Image (cartoon, helix red, strand yellow):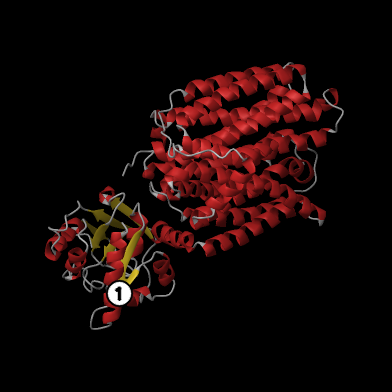
Amino acid sequence: MSEKNQFSLLSERRFGPFFVTQFLGAFNDNLYKNAMMILLAFQGASITTMSSDIVIQLSGALFILPFFLFSATAGQIADKYDKARLTRFVKVFEVIVMVLGGFGFYYKNLYLLMGALFLMGAHSTLFGPVKYAILPQHLKQEELVGGNGLVEMGTNVAILLGTVLGGILIGEKNGALFVAGIAICIAVFGYLSSRRIPAAPASSPDLVINWNIFDETWRNLQFTRKNRTVFLSILGISWFWLYGLVFLSQFPNLTKDVLYGDETVVSLLLTIFSVGIAVGSLLCERLSGHKVEIGLVPFGAIGLTVFGVDFYFACAHILPHAAGGAWYFLRNPLHIRLIADLFLIGLFGGFYIVPLYALIQIRSEPDHRSRIIAGNNILNALAMVFSVIMVIGLFKIGLTIPQVLLATALLNAIVAIYIFTLVPEFLMRFLIWMLIHTIYRLKKEGVEAIPDEGPALLVCNHVSLVDALVIAAASPRPIRFVMSHQIFKIPLLNFIFRTGKAIPIASRKEDPLILDRAYDTIAAALADGDLICIFPEGGLTPDGEIGEFKSGIQRILDRTPVTVVPLALQGLWGSFFSRKGGAAMRRWPRGFFSKIGLRVGPVVSANEAQPEVLRQQVGNLRGTWK
């Protein structure tokens, strides 16, 4: 497993050119869109007789419309053709659209401006499935979280820079020409960078494209629903788009009517929010340990609610005063809490969104991945439309802007609880993640020896009641644990074990039916390519030493010969969950952040995996640190 810093990916051809290409595309989208919106808001009377409010709302709808119309077709195209070639085609298309938009700015022609905006939406629609489906083809699984984190960081920074620069340039003399020229140059640079993206062969080259956009959109959504976890992850992403858009759309009026700031404060709020998401996205790799850690998703959801609610109370302390600029806003001590809340909303949003994108990438069937991501884009667009309807409805019943934001934060808690109840795997991973990041500090060594795919039997010493949780937290793959049926029944832990499909076992003397059922389940799981972990001592160590390995190992391997991976836990002896000094969980826990270790040894063939040999290897791995 690679332990390189995620930023090293930027220097590699398999990621760097793609990152630059998507960054420039997001920058151009927002440069053009914001410049056009401001132009229509302040000079709309010289361009059209329609109300500027109507034109601006129509502009937003035109940009989103292609996501509804063309996402399903874009997903098919991305599955059928090489994604690197498609990226270059999309970038050529962007150059043409920016030239068209440039003429629109030069002549202040509403139809050209609107047409280019619609085509930029189509450009983003076509690139969307390619953008996320190409990452699993160029990155290793342990690099996906870091890669997605960089993409989310880059996208948010690009949105911020494009929005701010578009607003600044369009206000200058001949600003429309500056916007047009820069947009065309950025599109050209995007095409040049796309030429360095390595080939990403078609995942489904024999696919026959259905050009009926309505029929294919329905089929796409139906297919997306087949994988329950993936579909609920998509709903979670769509909810975040709704949540984020509610906050972003209220920044202008919130600034004017509640915070008593000027236009520069709007840009400041956008900057704080965007930087928060960027930082949270980058931190995901470190917090997840170079694997897709969906336990961060509930953590992110908690932060979105807690700091969203606190944002409401922070606004309550702002008293009416003369409008001030960004510098005044930053210097006012009353605003510190509000700034911190907004940054933390973005930060926890990054924790929430990055693992969900990575989960969709690894859990989707490769030959349908682009179409599933296209389905995600359709639902994201629906969520954005619903956010507008929801906000209008909340205003209609008399809520103020801070109350709308409070209602959204509280609704986030309800949505999160609903999704995590439907997919308890999220909560299970959250509890495991919290264990390893609060009670313990886990040092891993040799984890790359655990096979990336295919069946294997993991054997480990048994020190505490949380051994399985520690191993699960360190493993890059899900593991099915074989454990005492008595431990399996422990409250709270039972929820985790059931969700993780643990296999309860008993001695023949205790219950021969449970024993035989366990061996049948183990054989079936190995035949399906799962990882199985057993604790061959048959129970917790009473003295910290490694006991005799029972013959159950041999029975498993005789029935299903697979490779064996020895593991050794260190530092758990004497913990609250061990049997040192008596029964486990009967004395005061020792300090938080205790250091523990997991060492993984080289794989052993089934023929060589005798119980005593494995016991010796586990002992050598553990050493003197119990």
Horizontal side of 127 relative to 542 (left or right) equals right
Q: Is residue 337 visible?
A: no
Of residues 576 and 179, which is closer to you in this image? 179
Location of residue 70 in the rendering, given as x and y in whole percent from the top left corner: 61, 38
Horizontal side of 556 relative to 151 (left or right) equals left
* Rendered view: 67 above or below 243: above
Q: Circle 1: is it few (<14), some (14-19), or many (20+) Cα within 10 Å?
A: some
Location of residue 17 in the rendering, given as x and y in whole percent from the top left corner: 45, 27
**Could you tell me which quadrant the C terminus lies in?**
bottom left
Indicate the quadrant where residue 5 lies.
Answer: top left
Residue type marked 1: Arg
**Could you tell me which quadrant the N terminus lies in?**
top left
Q: Which residue is at 70% across, 46% downward?
A: 385
Q: Which residue is at 78% across, 55% downward?
A: 399
Of residues 170 and 81, which is closer to you in this image? 81
Of residues 313 and 379, which is closer to you in this image? 379
Q: Is residue 529 visible?
A: yes
Q: Which residue is at 31% across, 56% downward?
A: 529
Location of residue 378 in the rendering, given as x and y in whole percent from the top left corner: 61, 45
Of residues 203 and 382, which is closer to you in this image? 203
Q: Which residue is mark 1?
A: 517
